[in-house]
Image (tube, helix red, strand yellow):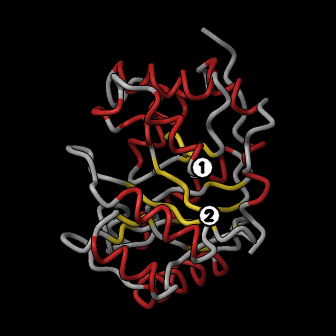
Amino acid sequence: MKQPVSLAPLMWDMHSHLLPGIDDGAPTLEHSIELIEKLIAFGYVGAVTTPHIYWDMYRNSPEIILEKLAVVKEEIAKRQLPFQLEAAAEYFCDEHFESQIEQGKLLHFGKEKYVLFEISFIQENINLGRAIFNMRLNGFQPILAHPERYEYWHSDFSRYESMLDKEVLLQVNINSLTGQYGPNVRRIAEKLIAKGMVSFIGSDCHHVGHIDLMEQARSSPSMKIFLESSRSLHSTISAH
């Protein structure tokens, strides 16, 4: 087995579901703290957690998210945990998302105004190009969440290259490197990393099972390649 690498060089995670009771992530405050303690054990110093905003399923708003963030931050302080927690969102690319772009109301992080978004796992989003254009027009830096998981792109690698051409950054899930989502997802994730196309690698942590898989991912050769890559932008995450 390969020698596991430390995740400490990442410092900040930028894709997770740590806020309690507002999406398919941590159901309670106790679960939130359990996940945070495990991220600390991996060497993370902080996270920008990203609850879903998906209008057909999770009608979260900045107000709801920031209210929950305050609750978790208060508990972190009470327990004196060495962890900084901020929040943005994982936006689903739908009509509501587009309206929020036009109003300039997107939750973002970093000086670069990073915005994490996802698209359908099932079929093409016909509004994808327009949404990307409008994010850039409104001063946001789009980050596409887990592009390796959009299986309808697997047969046409140029789709990933086109995202970079449109100045969209790519974020791969750590656990894609374990085969958790299938061998083809793993293959694409490894290829994206090998080609230096990945700017962020996120936990996408929803529950303890994801933490266990992250432990496995530490032994992935692609994890080591990413950690040694100058393409990584994790050092820019904490600049709020």
The x and y percentages for residue 113 are 65, 71
Q: Is residue 232 left or right of residue 145?
A: right
Pointer 2 and pointer 1: residues touching (CB < 8 Å)? yes
Q: Secondary structure at mark 1?
A: strand
The amino acid beneath tag 2 is Gln
The x and y percentages for residue 122 are 20, 43
Q: Quadrant of residue 147?
A: top left
Instruction: Specify few, some or many for label 2: CA neighbours under 10 Å numbering under 14, 14-19, or 20 or more.
Output: many
Q: What residue is disc 1 on? A: 169
Q: Is residue 177 left or right of residue 155?
A: right
Q: Secondary structure at mark 2?
A: strand
Q: Quadrant of residue 45?
A: bottom right
* Disc on res. 88: none
User: Where is 173 relative to 80, above or below?
Assistant: above
Q: What residue is disc 2 on? A: 141
Instruction: Specify few, some or many for label 1: CA neighbours under 10 Å numbering under 14, 14-19, or 20 or more.
Output: many
> In front: 51, or 194?
194
Q: Quadrant of the image for the N terminus?
A: top right
User: What distance separates the C-alpha of mark 2 from that of mark 1?
Assistant: 8 Å
Residue in the image at 52% along x and 85% along y? 104
The amino acid beneath tag 1 is Leu
Dot 2 or dot 1, earlier in sequence: 2
> In front: 150, or 41?
150
Residue in the image at 27% along x and 55% along y? 126
Residue in the image at 64% along x and 27% along y? 223
> In front: 237, or 111?
111
Q: Quadrant of the image for the C terminus?
A: bottom right
The x and y percentages for residue 88 are 53, 72
